Image: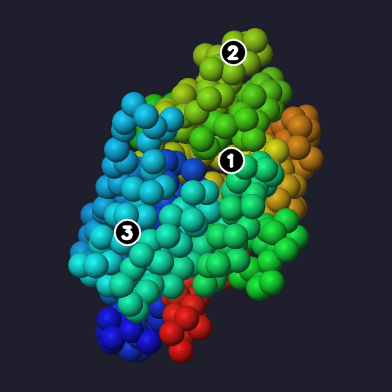
Amino acid sequence: AASDVHQSQDRGVTGAGPKRRLRVGLVGYPTPGGSGVVATELAHELARSGHEVHLFSHDVPFRLNRQPGLVYHAVEPPEHPVLLAAPYEMALAGEIAKVHERTPLDVIHAHFAVPHATAALVAARMARPPRPAVVVTLHGSDVTVLADDPALRRTLAYALAEADAVTAVSAWLAGLAASKFALARPVAVIPNFVNLDVYRPQPDPRLRARYAGPDETVVLHASNFRPVKRVVDVVRAFARLSRRVPARLLFVGEGPDCPAAYREAVAEGVAERVTFLGVQPQIVPWLGIADVFLLPSAEEGFGLSALEAMACGVPVVATDVGGLPEVVEHGVSGFLLRPGDVAAMAEAALRLSLDRSLAARVREAALARVRERFDARLVVPRYVETYLAARRALHG
C-alpha cells in the first residue's frame, strides 16, 4: 500500500477509534441531479471525518460547503475552432493527474460513469506510482439511458471492467448494470444517504405562511425537470387534489420541462396555486413546510429526493419503479403507484391530507427507515471500506 495513507484518530462517520486517513479525488457533476448531490455530500462527510478530499467538476457544485480538508478543483476545457466540442473528459483527466503529482491520491471516485469513469481511468494510468485506485459509482441514467447508445456502450463497459471497484446506489441498478455489461465482478450496492443532523423535521411556520394558508395542504416536488421526472403528472395529480381540499403546489428546481409544467397548470386552472421556486441550494427549509412530496418519475436509479423528504418527515407519494421500492415501503413509509396513474397519486395525497393519524404513522415509519438504513454514519464507512479494499487489491 502507498505510504501516503496516513493514520488518524478522527471519530467521524467512519466510526469510533483509529482509522486510515485517505486522500480521495471525487469526480461529479455540479448540477442538482442526484449523482452530483451525492458526490458533494460525500465530499463533505469524508472531509468532516478527517480525510483529505479533492472535488473535481466543471463548475462549483451547487451544494458545496467550504470546509477544512475539502478542496474544489475547477476543470476548464479549452475551446478551439477545430474542435466539435470542448474536450472536457481529457481536461478532467489532466487536472486529476496534475493534482496527483502534487498530492498523491489514494483513490479516484467517479460518480456517474459518463464520462467520469473513462476520465478517472486515464488519470490513474497517467499517475506516477503508486497509482490511485479507481472506484466508479453508477447512479441511474448512466446505465438506463446512456448505456443503450451504441457509441457509448462499448467504452462504458470497458471502463467498468477496468475500474478497481464498481458500486451502484440500488440493488435494482446493480443488477441492471451487471446484465447490460456482463461484468465479471459483482457490483457492490451502497445506497444514497443523508446527514441526519441536517435532514430532519424542521417546521417553519413563517415560511409556510408566505405560501399557504393554515388549512391548505402544501405539496412539494423537487427535481431537475427532465422528461423522466414526469412533472406534468405532478400538476395533474395536484389539480385533482386541489378540487377536493385547499392546496398549494411548490416546485423546486429547473429544467427542460418547466414550461410544460406551467402550461399544464394553466390548462388545469390551477396556475395561481402553483409556485416555481427555481433551484434552491438548501432543500430542507422547503421540506419543512411540505405536507406531501410527489415523485411520479418514469424511472429512478434510487430516488434521492424521496429519501431527503422522508428524512424531513414528509410523506412521499411516488412511483413503483427502479430503486424506489428499496427506499419507500409501500403503505408503510410512503406510497408507491404505477407510473402515469395520476388519479391514484391524487387519492394517496388526499388520504394523507385528510387523515392526520395516517400521515403521522407514515411520517414516523419514514423517519425510522432513514435512521436504520440511510444515515450517513452507516453508509459513508462502506465507501471508505470500498476504497481500502480497492487499494489492497491493486497494491497488495
Q: Identify the residue shown where x is 75% and y is 60%.
A: 179
**Residue at left offset 70%, top offset 51%:** 322
User: Would you name the residue on which mark 3 appears?
Assistant: 96
Q: Where is residue 95 in the image (x, y as percent from the top left)?
A: 29, 54
Q: Which residue is drawn at 45% across and 62% down?
A: 121
SS at circle 1: strand
Check the image and tell me how it is coloured: rainbow
Name the kind of residue labelled 2 in the image: Arg
Circle 2 residue: 263
Name the residue tied to disc 1.
293
The residue nearer to you, when weighing 123 against 301, is 123
Kindly check if marks 3 and 2 are in contact, taking CB atoms under 8 A apart as contact.
no
* In this picture, residue 16 sits left or right of residue 307: left
Residue 193 horizontal/vertical position (percent): 50, 61
Instruction: Name the N-terminal-most of marks 1 and 2.
Output: 2
Image check: 343 left or right of 273? right
- Characterize the local packing of mark 2: few (<14), some (14-19) or many (20 or more) Cα atoms within 10 angstroms: some
Tell me if residue 233 can be seen. yes
Q: Distance between the residues labelled 1 and 2?
A: 21 Å
Which mark sits nearer the N-terminus, 3 or 2?
3
- Write the residue at 26% across / 60% down: 98
The answer to whether 265 is drawn above or below residue 65 in the figure is above
Q: Nearer the viewer, mark 3 or mark 2?
A: 3
Residue 121 — which label? none
Q: What x and y, as percent, mark residue 23? A: 31, 72
